[in-house]
Amino acid sequence: MPFQVFESQMVVISETRFTIRYAQAADIEQMVAIQEAVYDGYSPWQAADFSFELRHPEDRIYLVVEHEHRLVAFIGLVQRAWYHDLHITNLAVLPIWQGHGIGSFLLKMVQKLGEELNLPATSLEVRASNHIARRLYEKIGYQTIAIIKEYYRDNHEDALSMVLNIDR
């Protein structure tokens, strides 16, 4: 199991205390609600999608960020053997918590996990129109390597494939 490198932890981000821990089946409803808040009532991933991901811990990990026993963010990762990378499948932060450094913290945590797993890169796809997320990824050091035409099923929007090479 590659993700034994992570242990639940209490962290302080922007002077606020959070708990970061493994997602559990009981968190799925709140994870869907976070996506609905981020995407104006639409959840790109349904409960069944999250349930599938959580049932495959051999190559996937989902972490949640909790503040006062409520989820405020989550991130999903998969270790892809064929690309030899750690791929971010999903990242969402409640709108009221955006801009507080939670997304940046999670992305840096992913980079550390990749280093601990001796992986050369982390990767993700982002909607071409999601300029806020793209700026965050670029600030962390992700670079666009490809445009994937009509990647998103809901509206056939293009995605940018982005990679962060991990320094060792």
Image (cartoon, grey):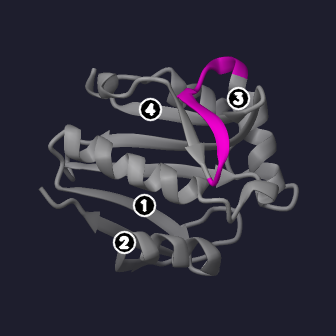
Q: Position of residue 14 (x, y in %)?
A: 63, 54
Q: Which residue is mark 1?
A: 124
Q: Which residue is mark 3?
A: 28
Q: Which residue is mark 2?
A: 142
Q: Is residue 146 above or below residue 18?
A: below
**Other residues around mark 3 within 10 Å, as few (<14) / some (14–19) / many (≥20):** some
Observer able to see residue 81: no
Q: Secondary structure at mark 1?
A: strand
Q: Amino acid at mark 4?
A: Ile
Q: Position of residue 114 (x, y in %)?
A: 26, 46
- Asked if disc 2 and disc 1 are in contact, CB closer than 8 Å, the reply is yes
- Asked if disc 2 and disc 4 are in contact, CB closer than 8 Å, the reply is no
- Specify which label sits upstream in the sequence, 2 or 1: 1
- Label 1 and label 3: CA atoms lie apart by 21 Å
Q: Amino acid at mark 2?
A: Tyr
State the quadrant of the N terminus.
Answer: top left
Is residue 94 found inside the magenta-colored segment of the image? no
Q: Which residue is mark 4?
A: 61
**Discs 2/3, front:** 2
- Residue that sits furthest to the front in the current view: 15
Specify the segment rendered in magenta.
14-26
